[in-house]
Each structure stands twice: as C-alpha cells, then as structure tokens.
C-alpha cells in the first residue's frame, strides 16, 4: 500500500527544522494532522544520470532540503548507513528522504530499497522514480518497500508535492 496524507511522520526529532514526511510505515497511524516545515529535510537523490541528480538536487535545495547525491543503489545504501551513524544510531523517527531511481548499474533501485529496508527498517522514507509508475515493474518496485512512487521525468516540485501531500 502506498503512503497516504493521513500517515504522518515528523522528522523534527532527530534533525532540527526538517520537513514532515508522509509514510505508510508511520508509527502515528492515521490520526495525525498535516503540517509541513520545508526547511532542510535530509534527502538522498539516487540516479545514475548525473543531469537528473543535479536538476532534482538544485530544485530541492531551493525548496530548503539538504542534499546528498548517489549514482547507484550501493552508494544510496552507504549514504543511508552514514546518515544512520550521524543520527546516533537512529531514532524512532524518520531520518530522511530517499528519492530512488529504479534502473541503475551496480545495484538497482529495487535491490537498494530492499537493502535499506532490511538494514534500517522504516528509518528512511523512500520514493521511487520510474518511467512506468503504473506497470508491473512499478508494482515490483513498490513491493520492495517504497513509501511512494513518481513517474519520470519528476521535478523537484513533484517530489515536494509528494512529501507535502503524500501522493
């Protein structure tokens, strides 16, 4: 099941001034009221296309997100590991947002999503990017543990709208 706007997780506890991120894995259930502070949500952009990474990163930075870039799924897992350590082993809250491309060399988005979920559980909100957000490949990607999925090409505003609205 994809995330809904009713399932809220507040990132402010482990990281000051962060965006509230919507997640189906929320410990808050469906009782939260939507509130968003868009300053400095820790975000990892994962895409093997350097131009795509740059465009999303620049746009999200303008919207107040702090940024890390990864060129493949293994780099994304490593960045999550580093973020987990920086957050003192992780709190019970979300540690950041991962925007994950599906098709990449070394480790694809499906494998990376599974690895992040296996190692960190629900510590990160993961939004997938794919050229076919409605087909069987998207179903497999979602089943790997995504909180949401967006069709490519996705802009920074598309990602931000998902964070704010959960869809």
Image (tube, rainbow, N blue to C red):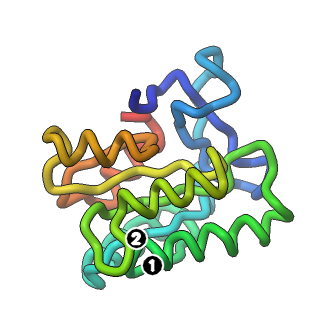
Q: Position of residue 93 (x, y in %)?
A: 73, 44
Figure quadrant of residue 109: bottom left
Q: Secondary structure at mark 2?
A: strand
Quarter of the rendering occupied by the N terminus: top left
Q: Which mark is residue 70?
A: 1
Quarter of the rendering occupied by the C terminus: top left
Tell whether label 1 touches label 2 (CB within 8 Å).
yes
Density class for disc 2 (Cα within 10 Å; few <14, some 14-19, many ≥20) is: many
Side of 58 relative to 86 (left or right): left
Determine which residue is flagged by label 2.
46
Residue at 54% of width from left, 56% of height from top?
97
Q: Position of residue 152 (x, y in %)?
A: 19, 57
Q: Which mark is residue 131?
A: none
Q: Work out whether 13 lies above or below 5.
A: below
Q: Residue furthest top?
A: 31
Q: Residue furthest right?
A: 88
Question: How far apart are the two marked residues, 2 and 1, measured between alpha carbons?
Answer: 5 Å
Density class for disc 1 (Cα within 10 Å; few <14, some 14-19, many ≥20) is: many
Residue at 67% of width from left, 48% of height from top?
94
Foreground residue among 42 and 80: 80
Q: Position of residue 7 (x, y in %)?
A: 56, 26
Q: Position of residue 143 (x, y in %)?
A: 37, 40
Q: Work out whether 157 lies above or below 25.
A: below
Figure quadrant of residue 153: bottom left
């Amino acid at each position: 099941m994809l995330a809904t706007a009713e399932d809220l997780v507040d990132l402010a506890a482990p990281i000051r001034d962060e965006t509230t991120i919507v997640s189906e894995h929320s410990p808050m259930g469906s009782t939260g009221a939507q509130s968003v502070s868009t300053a400095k949500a820790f975000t990892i952009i994962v895409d093997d296309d350097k131009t795509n990474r740059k465009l999303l990163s620049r746009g999200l930075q303008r919207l107040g997100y702090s940024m890390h870039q990864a060129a493949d799924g293994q780099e994304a897992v490593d960045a999550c590991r580093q973020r987990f350590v920086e957050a003192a082993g992780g709190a019970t809250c979300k540690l950041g947002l991962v925007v994950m491309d599906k098709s990449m060399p070394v480790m694809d988005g499906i494998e990376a999503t599974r690895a992040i979920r296996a190692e960190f559980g629900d510590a990160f909100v993961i939004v997938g990017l794919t050229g076919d957000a409605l087909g069987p490949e998207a179903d497999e990607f979602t089943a790997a543990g995504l909180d949401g999925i967006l069709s490519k090409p996705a802009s920074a505003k598309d990602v931000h709208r998902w964070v704010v609205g959960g869809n």
